Amino acid sequence: GQNIDQPTEMTATEGAIVQINCTYQTSGFNGLFWYQQHAGEAPTFLSYNVLDGLEEKGRFSSFLSRSKGYSYLLLKELQMKDSASYLCAVKDSNYQLIWGAGTKLIIKP
Amino acid sequence: GAVVSQHPSWVICKSGTSVKIECRSLDFQATTMFWYRQFPKQSLMLMATSNEGSKATYEQGVEKDKFLINHASLTLSTLTVTSAHPEDSSFYICSASPPGDSTEAFFGQGTRLTVV
């Protein structure tokens, strides 16, 4: 079966750095996405990786290793507004998005 | 970026009634749209894939007669929850992607359905 694993919850301090890991086992791979979702709202796109390596976009970076079935989302200079759930999703061989359960990130002052 | 609009944002209905949720792609044509359901503190669960001009594809365990999907145009898909019950109360979200297999999915605002 297809499976995406990420931690259920993480806590970090304002101004610090946090890394959210995601491992996946899917039938085929056509890209990995990270989304941010605030409670009661729809997910918003953060990043996309299809080749191995690091993609940097402002305070957020995402890394992919296809051979290891592994990705991480790195958030720097954490702000209180970064408190949200972070969803890892993989497009499988049918280009269908398979979603992880999400990681709830709690930012403390 | 591309815009997907979903309406209504929230709805309260009585048990036994039907509720229609609309999903529109405002600046691109979407031959395929996706309907998700999300319970509190859980991830998105794909309910069905809406295909323009043809029948929707439902995920295992989703009752197609209860969750009616119509995708009559390239910019509009509708989800109708028929004979709603309290256990249907949930957050329903649609998404669509502009043409191109590597593009991100854009989401509607979501619809909070409460059945009383």
Image (cartoon, coloured by chain):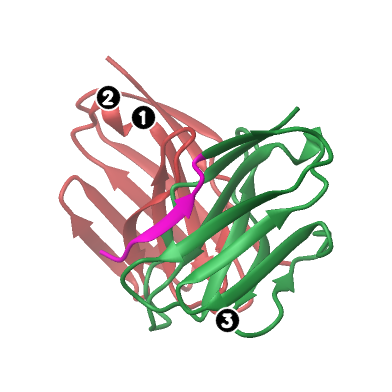
Chain colours: A red, B green
Say which of marks 3 and 1 sits in front.
Answer: 3
Which residue occupies 35% across, 68% down?
A: A49
**Residue corresponding to mark 2:** A80
Q: Mark 1 lies on which chain?
A: A
Of residue A108 and residue A41, the one placed in the foreground of this image is A41
Q: Which amino acid does label 3 sit on?
A: Glu
Q: In this view, does B43 lie to the left or right of A78?
A: right
Amino acid type at image mark 1: Ser
Kind of element beneath mark 1? loop
List x then y, in percent, for residue A71: 42, 58
* Residue drawn at point x = 38 percent, y = 65 percent: A64
- SS category of the residue bearing label 3: loop
Q: Which chain carries label 2?
A: A
Residue at coordinates 39% horizontally, 82% vertically from top-left?
Answer: B99
Q: Does the magenta stretch include residue B3?
A: yes
Q: Is residue A42 left or right of residue A53?
A: right
Density class for disc 1 (Cα within 10 Å; few <14, some 14-19, many ≥20) is many
Q: Is residue A103 left or right of residue B71?
A: left
Q: Are marks 2 and 1 on the same chain?
A: yes
Q: Nearer the viewer, residue A102 or B96?
A: B96
Residue A53 lies, in percent from the top left, at 29, 68
Which range is magenta?
B1-9
Q: Which amino acid does label 2 sit on?
A: Met
Task: Locate the N terminus of chain B and report the quarter of the image it occupies.
Answer: bottom left
Image position, residue A68 (x, y; %): 49, 67
> Which residue is label 1 attached to?
A83
Q: Marks 1 and 2: in contact by CB < 8 Å?
A: yes
Q: Residue A18 carries which label?
A: none
Residue under label 3: B52
Q: Nearer the viewer, residue A77 or B103?
A: B103
Q: Mark 3 lies on which chain?
A: B
